[in-house]
Amino acid sequence: MDRKSIIILAVCFLALMGWFPLVNKLYPPKPLPPGATDALAMAQAEARTNAPTAPPTLTAAPKPVIRSDAQEELLVVTNDNARYTFTSHGGGLKLVELVHYPETIPARRQKTAELSRVATLNTHVLVPVLAVLGDDSVQGDGIYALTKTATGVRAEKTLTNGLRLIKEFRLSTNYVLTATVRLENTSDQPLTSPAQEWTVGTATPMGPDDKNAVQNVGLMWYDGKKSQDVGPTWFDNRTLGCIPGVPHTEYRNGASNVVWAAVHNQFFALVFMPKEPAPQIVARPVDLPHPADEQRPANGRPVLPPKGVQAALIYPGMTLEPGQVIERQIHFFAGPKEYRTLARIGSRFNNNVDLVMGFGGFFGWFAKALLVSMNGLYAVVPNYGLVIILITIIIKGLFWPLTQASTRSMKRMAALQPQMKALQEKYKDDPTKMNKKLMEFMKENKASPLGGCLPMLLQMPVFIGFFYMIRSAIELRGARFLWVNDLSKPDTLFMIPGLDFPFNPLPLLMGVTMLWQARMTPPSPGMDPTQQKLMKYMPLMFLVMLYNFSAGLTLYWTVQNLLTIAQMKLTKAQQGPATAPKTLVITAPQKRKK
């Protein structure tokens, strides 16, 4: 790499460090409009003041779960995979603790046994899963009677108007619970129940090391054909991700086609799967509690509250005749985004719940294939860093003939450039004829301008599939390789003093290899010098975009670049002198006789 390349690389690195602080200073996030709070915020305020609170006007959120100072009763039920805590406040599932997954990946000097906290779902929120929210006719004071059963927990409540709500939770295998909800009219008169929100849960970050990962939390739902994902960035409503607009206070969708709804973070999900598709889905942003004092930065800077997304299914109002019972059944999945488990559950309920991993669309097929291949290789080579390198080598081997043909095509195009420039000069006043003559000349010499681009285009689905796979593959969480502590996160060695910016070696190595490869690639014919320089330093854009992406992804791309460089050198060494192009005789235009 020459001196100019090093200077440009350093300037881009400095610009990368200053970009986000500059944007946050110029465009600070706008607060929500007055009154645009959510049910959780209202419940928190109610818990502090013990006074009735009016529902917000903009979001039409239901009243708080609890409007009294009644003591909370908790029941804990466990199985081999999780610990479930049920609450009398709302009669739902308060917390899910996944006993086999630590909340935070330990540093190399720590031992996993030293970490007592485990990964949780619906963390630090006051609205439990399957809380039925609405007005007094379906909610009352929100206090339920809890009873432990042989297979789970029973929560029940009788309202003053004679409506009785009974929820029975039964534990199952593969992180699945089944809930049956019954609404009974125990009075001697018809009862009209208004529309209700049945709480799916709240998407929250995984722990202290994930408190700023806004892109990882959100709502996903499936309408029987495709899945849709909504996160805090949608609610922030920033143009180009930077310039703030008026925040969205509520997301509402569905037309009796909500097959399932999930609140999720990067590696864990809580999926609400009704037996019959629900009418609508609603979601609202929530502010979660601040980190504990010991989790705050040592520099004393203020910490913005972490964001979450609370979701619920909407069921319409109805009239129950005396003695009438309405029963609905919901299956829950509360666990890791592990493809094999989710695929089994999706097959069991025929609902494609594995789409919660983000493996939908054309590129999702590549993501699934790569994940299955990665786990198969891991059974032979028990190190995911080495497995990623092996997969990269295998993919490169499959594309080797195509890439080799591309390299030869680019070399042939470079040899033809002088004569092609002569053609361009001769027919510069007639672009149509110039293009025709150029195509005839390249066809005669068996050269194609697309020969160098085709292998890259064919490999892009594989790269994007790698991105999708690594983004949510829980197998890579905590997987170590060389200095990398966690292949699912950036390979940060340390924070640069005074700048509070991470030093990530793998993206820098990736940028160097991309620049090296760009310098070895001959320019396309007809490209002016300015465009050639621009294409030479185009890889720096990828450095900026991928600097804070997972180490697994940058490891794949770095190895891919090194293999491409080796192949280009090998092809050049094996290939003899370039075949001389067929002679092109260009005669000067003759002057007409007067």
Image (cartoon, rainbow, N blue to C red):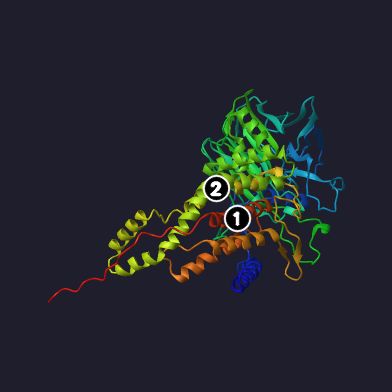
Q: Nearer the viewer, residue 542 or 286?
A: 542
Amino acid under disc 2:
Trp
Q: What residue does disc 2 label?
A: 400
Q: What residue does disc 1 label?
A: 566
Distance in Å between CA atoms under marks 1 and 2? 11 Å
The vertical placement of 96 against 451, above or below, is above
> What is the secondary structure assignment of the residue under circle 2?
helix
Instruction: Indicate which disc residue 245 carries.
Output: none
Q: Quarter-wise, where is residue 525 in the image? A: bottom left
Q: Do callouts 1 and 2 mark residues in contact (Cβ within 8 Å)?
A: no
Q: Is residue 244 visible?
A: no
Q: Residue extending furthest right?
A: 114
Image location (x, y in percent) of residue 178: 69, 29
Q: Quarter-wise, where is residue 73 in the image? A: top right
Point out the image quarter for the C terminus.
bottom left
Point out the image quarter for the N terminus.
bottom right
Image location (x, y in percent) of residue 557: 62, 54
